[in-house]
Image (tube, grey):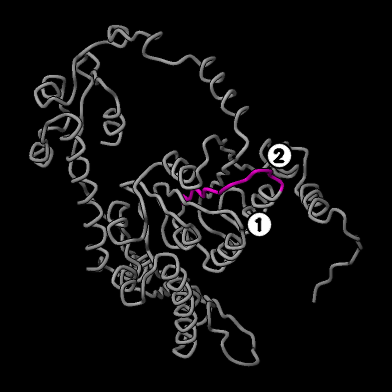
Amino acid sequence: ENKYRQALLADKIYMLDTRQSTFIFRGYLHKELYLKSFLEKFGVKMNVLHIGNYKVAGEKYNHNEMSEEKKESIKNIKDKIFEGFVKLVKDKRGTDIEEEILNGDLIFAGKEKALEYKLIDGVADYDEIGINYKEDTVSLEDYVSMSKEKKEKAKDTIAVINLEGVIDGRNSKKSITYENVCDKLEILEEMKNLKGLVLRINSPGGSALVSEKIYKKLKKLTVPIYVSMGDLCASGGYYIATTGQKLFANNLTLTGSIGVVMMYPEVVETLKKLDVNLEGFEKGIGFDMLNPFDKLGEDSKEKIIYNMNEVYTEFKEHVMKARGMNDEELEKIAQGRVWLGSEAKNINLVDEIGSLEECIKSMADDLKLDKYKVRIIELTQTIKETLTDIKLPFVSEEVKEKIEFLQGNMNQVLYYENDFEL
């Protein structure tokens, strides 16, 4: 279905003239492995605490069956995606194929059925389609020339920062970290004629603390912020998105998930099964908290839940301020619920359905920018990252660490200190 969605953007759709060329359209299937009893065989218990009845991440580790809340949430999303696909085909091709899909008539459907159900315009080999490259395409030279001309005339700039991946406290170029966001924002400070910032967010969430730090950093900017959501802008991703004055999503963007979850393993029984004795001593209380080698006590559990509620409250405060809601209104759509972009617009979690390009154009229109250029903010690799990527066998980890240390302490007084162990 996803490839056919892309094909529906075309004016004409052709199918290769071979018996091997087929369509496979089906409804949907969703299954997950539930591991509670399996883990217990090894003495492992997963402590999963959540704020929000629909914040169901991790439930497969401490349940043997899917919760009704998760079934409801996933079924709603899957139904909406399926209905959207059927509607898209009907709008673009003028044919309703819902019954045929559910009956299995379009599983390995060949060219005859594809023509019968108006899914294609014809059958032809690629060189028989008859594309007129001069009339139907734009040459690379013309495209570059037009782009250069536009840049030369434009002075005002809209910056785009891409935030992709899990929100993490560890500094990694493959995730969203406070450090790499700050590095990108430093580039903005040096830009002249910067009129606005578009955040392109594609993230399932992650660390609440890092999300809050990024939120505070972005709120200090003096230029307007718009947000363009990718396939996923949920939980911590939406937390960061609340810095935007206008939020754009795709119809199929997964967003929301306003809630908090925490999970960690407990292996007390595992040690017993392996005849391992963990010996030691302590002073004070609370060491069972987030400790896999100790059972979580009720007092510590209450403290963790209290802290999680504090995070949830702060999350909701940001959403209420950004979206103009009160607590009662927000609670109806929060609780960890995940929404499609089309639904999120109806419940005021996003403002518009549109692409990144449409988000940028909307900002330009709102700011009354007649001519403007778009600059995508990217970080250059450090020496250490370059050495890591090319994986030279003769560059030791110690050398990479020394380079990273020197880069991080440039223009500072350096001193030498012996490490010691107790």
Inspect this view and state whether residue 17 appears.
Answer: yes
Q: Which residue is mark 2?
A: 386
Q: Is residue 198 magenta?
A: yes
Q: Is residue 371 above or below residue 39?
A: above
Mark 1 crowdedness (10 Å alpha carbons): few <14, some 14-19, many ≥20:
some
Q: Position of residue 155 (x, y in %)?
A: 63, 36
Q: Quadrant of residue 158?
A: top right
Q: Residue at x 23, y 51 (%)?
A: 78
Q: Earlier in the sequence, mark 2 or mark 1?
A: 1
Instruction: Tell me the CA gap for discs 2 and 1.
Output: 18 Å
- Quadrant holding the N terminus: top left
Q: Position of residue 220 (x, y in %)?
A: 62, 62
Q: Position of residue 224 (x, y in %)?
A: 54, 54
Q: Quadrant of residue 389?
A: top right
Q: Is residue 233 above or below residue 13?
A: below
Q: Residue at x 56, y 80 (%)?
A: 277
Q: Is residue 34 magenta?
A: no
Specify whether 206 is left or right of 93: right
Q: Quadrant of residue 387?
A: top right
Q: Residue at x 66, y 57 (%)?
A: 179
Q: Name the amino acid, label 1.
A: Glu
Q: Which residue is mark 1?
A: 179
Determine the secondary structure under disc 2: helix
- Quadrant holding the C terminus: bottom right
Query: Label 1 near label 2: C-beta < 8 Å?
Result: no
Give the magenta part as a residue range: 190-202
Prevailing SS of the magenta stretch: strand
Q: Name the amino acid, label 2.
A: Thr
Inspect this view and state whether residue 45 appears.
Answer: no
Specify whether 366 is left or right of 326: right
Q: Position of residue 101 (x, y in %)?
A: 13, 38
